[in-house]
Amino acid sequence: MATSPNQPVPDDDLQPEYDFRTMRGVVRGKYAARYRERLRMVRLAADVSAAFADEAAVNAALRENLTWHQKHPTPVTLTEIA
């Protein structure tokens, strides 16, 4: 609905007669499990987080660490296997 510049914009245009419980195919939390699968949150200790400026710096450091470990694999000894 178009409004003129002189009319205030309504805060909410949801009508009270809408009843979502009677609508077919509407499921509360339908994608919640899929979202939680992909969400990985890691809490850093205070002393570790102080070493990084922001989230991007943490990700860059972790990527560098992963790259280094891929190039320099740790040899497995026979005592670690047994």
Image: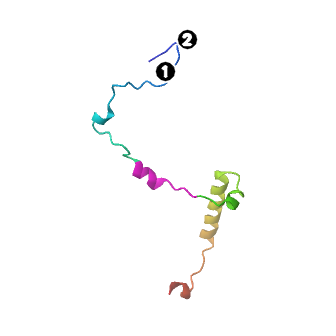
Q: Residues within 10 Å of mark 1 (few under 14, many from 20)?
A: few
Q: Quadrant of the N terminus?
A: top left
Q: Does the residue at mark 1 contact the one at mark 2 (Cβ under 8 Å)?
A: no
The residue type indicated by label 1 comes to Pro
Judging depth in this view, the residue of 63 and 80 nearest the camera is 80
Q: Which residue is mark 2?
A: 6
The residue depicted at 54 percent of the width and 56 percent of the height is 41
Above or below, comparing residue 43 to residue 4 in the picture = below
Q: Could you tell me which residue is drawn at 51 percent across and 84 percent down?
A: 81
Quarter location, residue 19 = top left
From the top left corner, tell me how far across and down residue 70 is, in percent.
Answer: 59, 69
Left or right, residue 16 beside residue 6: left
Query: Tag 1's secondary structure?
Result: loop
Depicted 55 relative to depicted 5: above or below = below
Question: Start and end of the magenta stretch?
Answer: 32-42
Which residue is identified by label 1?
A: 10
Residue at 37% in and 25% down: 16
Label 2 residue SS: loop
User: Which color scheme does this rendered protein use?
Assistant: rainbow
Residue 75, percent across and down? 59, 80
The residue shown at (62%, 70%) is 69
Q: How far across and down, in percent of the image, does residue 21 sit?
A: 30, 36
Q: Identify the amino acid type marked 2.
A: Asn
Which secondary structure is most common in the magenta stretch?
Answer: helix
